[in-house]
């Protein structure tokens, strides 16, 4: 019976080592850098649905809402620009995801007319950032300001407003 007890004690002792920090956790503590799995929260997950909202204007009365559906590297969804007391733009997004960058075409209706705009986003699990638009004076159309940084920040939101469409 004594050998059986000795084997059980040795087995329990070997399991007790599972609670120690791994080398990644030790590295993070030593360097102050986040190398844990929590850092992965900033990367977009594929085959997911995301909803974001951005408000601006006087008292945050102008709203832009973005609903993205990611399947592998294909992006689809909806985008609505809803300024207070102005003509709205509501339509669909279709594009591609490359790393954390989304390049898409926004097909929308405004004042009863169909139109399209190219849009560029940077996606993380917590927020969406968009490159701003500027006016091309030669064509009179809006376009992505490719020289600008991703400065229009959208916050994560629930998708209820899109499901009621």
Image (cartoon, rainbow, N blue to C red):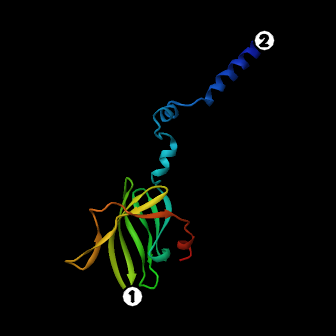
Q: Secondary structure under badge 1?
A: loop
Residue highlighted by disc 1: 112
Q: Residue furthest right?
A: 1
| Label 2 Cα neighbours within 10 Å, binned few <14 / some 14-19 / many ≥20 | few
Residue 26 position, x and y percent, is 51, 31
Whether residue 139 is situated above or below residue 74 in the rendered picture: below
136 to the left or right of 119: left
Q: Residue at x 50, y 58 (%)?
A: 48
The reply to whether dot 2 and dot 1 touch (C-beta < 8 Å) is no
Whether residue 41 is situated above or below residue 106 in the rendered picture: above
Q: Residue furthest left?
A: 138
Residue 144 position, x and y percent, is 30, 68
Q: Residue at x 30, y 62 (%)?
A: 148
Number of marks: 2
Q: Quadrant of the N terminus?
A: top right
Residue highlighted by disc 2: 2
């Amino acid at each position: 019976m004594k050998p059986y007890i000795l084997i059980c004690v040795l087995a329990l002792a070997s399991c007790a080592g599972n609670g120690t920090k791994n080398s990644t956790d030790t590295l993070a503590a030593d360097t102050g850098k986040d190398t844990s799995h929590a850092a992965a929260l900033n990367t977009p997950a594929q085959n997911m649905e995301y909803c974001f909202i951005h408000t601006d204007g006087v008292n945050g009365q102008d709203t832009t809402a973005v609903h993205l559906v990611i399947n592998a590297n294909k992006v689809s969804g909806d985008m609505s620009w809803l300024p207070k007391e102005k003509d709205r733009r509501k339509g669909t997004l279709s594009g591609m995801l490359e790393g954390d960058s989304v390049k898409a075409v926004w097909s929308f209706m405004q004042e009863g007319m169909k139109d399209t705009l190219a849009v560029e986003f940077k996606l993380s699990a917590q927020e969406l950032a968009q490159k701003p638009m500027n006016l091309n004076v030669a064509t009179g159309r809006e376009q992505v300001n490719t020289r600008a940084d991703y400065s229009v920040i959208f916050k994560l939101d629930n998708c209820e407003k899109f499901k009621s469409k």
